[in-house]
Image: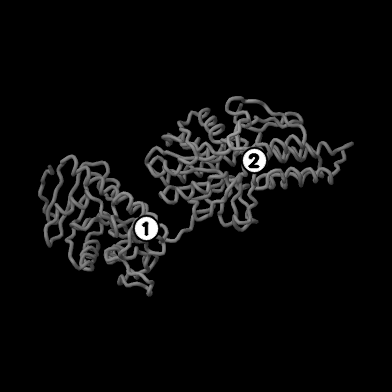
Amino acid sequence: MDDSSLVWDDGTLVTVDQRGLPHEVRELRLSTVDQVIDAIRTLAIRGAPAIGIAGAFGVVLATAAHTVGGVVDETAAQAEADRIAAARPTAVNLAWAVRRVRAKVGRGADAVLAETLDMLAEDGRVNRAAATNAADLVQRLCPDRPLRVLTHCNTGRLATSAFGTAIGTLRVLSERGAIEQVLVDETRPLLQGARLTTWELAEAGIPHRLTIDSAAAWAMATGQVDCVLVGADRVTANGDVANKIGTYGLALAARHHGIPFVVVAPESTRDLSMATGREIVVEERAAAEVTGFGGVATAPAHTEVFNPAFDVTPADLVTAVVTEEGVVHRSDRSPGAEIADLARELYRRGWMPGTAGNISVRTGATAVVTGSGLSKGELTERDMVTVRVADSAPVTDQGRKPSAETTIHTAVYRARPAQAVVHIHPPFATALATRSATPGMLGTLRITDYELIKGLGGGDPAVADIPVFPNWPEVPRIGSDIERYLLDHPDALPVLVIAGHGITAWGDDLAQARDRAECLEALCELVCRTGSPAAFGPRDDFLEIGLT
């Protein structure tokens, strides 16, 4: 089989019967409207773009069947087009494709065919462009490492007509050497992931593992997933996404674990006439798909079944929707929600134990910061306080007090154009900072010759001079020290430590601030574990020592 899953052969639509895969690759030849509709309904042809183009070929067959002596019975042909468009209601591509070609019915079957063949050729180009755009985005979201990607259902050339959307993205990433492994959901109840996606990935030489759908969240929890890539059957105007059942659960798990959730689809899948996902008609399929498989019953006879073919993922759980036009939707979440997500992540890592630590995001002349005295493992977006950058005071009475270290955050914002600050208590950096401190004096911790130094964002990739601030009982005094130091040292690294009081890092966004804090903790762990030399002492007066 070549890269196209749909071929027109002199009056017949030729495709692969997806019901036989992966064990049997059998050709399916469709020459009547009823055959096309049956193939779409029984999932011999499936995937939103593929059924759309197959439906357009069905209109070609309908027009030819209702043409006598060169005259088209348009009423009859259009009625057949209505039947085709209704074959599966959720995927918008079917109605879109039928609507596009039925405008040519009055000009005869050849005109409908020409339009359909144009659509077929476009699909491969569109999918490759969307996949390339999505690959670019994924590499920006998850830079500098081979990726472990989770995917759901089947989104390759079998689901389109060529190349694929989410699987197309995996192909692009693989061509760039950016894939470590793909985790493939089996995709109950009809196992499109197990039967089709594994087949396509094996054919493309992309390393992969198959997993049961219910293991996906645990794979995320155990650090086996960097990004989730899925396709779509319909994207509404507000960015809600209808896709294979199980997608919504993946998005919830990805959001909980701070993992990008990216949807890849052609523009034809976007339905801007539909405001939200609440308007989507979700197809429910036969009970037999759930009560058994392959002709073998797995549930008691007459068991009632809930078998939706799709679910709808709310837009705020979607990191991005990517089409051939680029990123057309980005999750517009509140700063508080993003802070809460990161706080829970850092709490699970032991870096914000109990109520310790705080995070903020700048919002112009104000900043949103975590509230005081709250467990970071249970933080929500409602647990934030908005303060003025100028004086750290709450903007209004918001029912919560800002964290005590708010003055540290606002000091950074006044001295730097940072947009996010993370103040945490990771063990190695905290311990090393305490050991390196000179009571009542500004000190410096110098770390050299580690590759990770580059991750701190400084100008010298070989040396990191990290200021160590005294831990005054009056936290505003710490903030004053930090602000004065940053104003006097415009080239200072965007990280600092406070003796016995953890570390602070900042950046253009929360991800960059977190990454810099992670790099600092990793460097301090290397020094502590290896006993490699570090330099401690008052500012500009270093004392070389070796840790044991």
In the figure, is residue 129 to the left or right of 96? left
Which residue is located at x 50 percent, y 51 percent?
A: 318
Amino acid type, label 1: Glu
Q: How is the image coloured?
A: one colour
The residue at the far right in this view is 69
Which residue is located at x 34 percent, y 63 percent?
A: 370
The residue at the far bottom in this view is 397
> Residue 534: percent from the left, percent from the top?
15, 46
Marks 2 and 1, how far apart in space? 43 Å
Q: Secondary structure at mark 2?
A: loop
> Residue 431: percent from the left, percent from the top?
18, 51
> Where is mark 2, residue-wise?
302
Dot 1 crowding, Cα within 10 Å, few <14, some 14–19, many 20+: some
2 and 1 marks in contact (CB < 8 Å): no
Which comes before the other along the chain, label 2 or label 1? 2
In the figure, is residue 340 to the left or right of 477? right
> Residue 140: percent from the left, percent from the top?
42, 46
* Residue 178 falls in image quadrant: top left
* Residue 6 falls in image quadrant: top right
Amino acid type, label 2: His
> Where is mark 1, residue-wise?
378
